[in-house]
Amino acid sequence: MLLPKYPDNPTPPPAHTHAPTDPAPVQRSLPAVSIDHKTIAALVVSGVVLTALLAAVAVTAISVAVAAVVLRSMLRDQHRR
């Protein structure tokens, strides 16, 4: 059997080294984001509109598929006569 050969290292390196702390830690400030009622309303309205458009596309695709099946069956009946 093949067994892995580990290097001879009796003491592993430390996993965490303590870094000296600065007297004044640097604080990162994020830019202020203001969200008002108009922004939330616009997001809700755009979500509703996009959902309605997606539903309209799905309904259209289903109706086209049904119409294609009906026309195909009608044309097949015509060819059999």
Image (cartoon, rainbow, N blue to C red):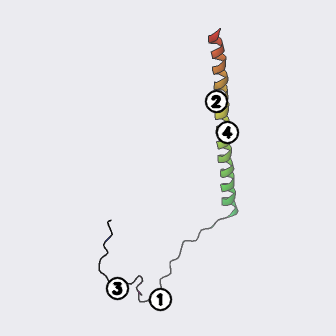
Q: Could you tell me which secondary element the residue under label 2 belongs to? A: helix
Horizontally, is 29 left or right of 11 in the view? right
Q: Quadrant of the N terminus?
A: bottom left
Q: Which mark is residue 72?
A: none
Q: Please, which residue is most extreme toward the front here?
A: 1
Q: Could you tell me which secondary element the residue under label 1 belongs to? A: loop
Q: Could you tell me which secondary element the residue under label 3 belongs to? A: loop
Residue at label 4?
56
Q: Position of residue 24 (x, y in %)?
A: 47, 89
Q: Which amino acid, mark 2?
A: Ala
Q: Quadrant of the C terminus?
A: top right
Q: Give the residue drawn at x 29%, y 80%.
A: 8
Residue at label 3?
11
Disc 3/disc 2 C-alpha distance (Å): 70 Å
Earlier in the chain: of badge 3 and badge 1, it is 3
Compared with 44, 34 (above or below) is below
Q: Which amino acid, mark 3?
A: Thr
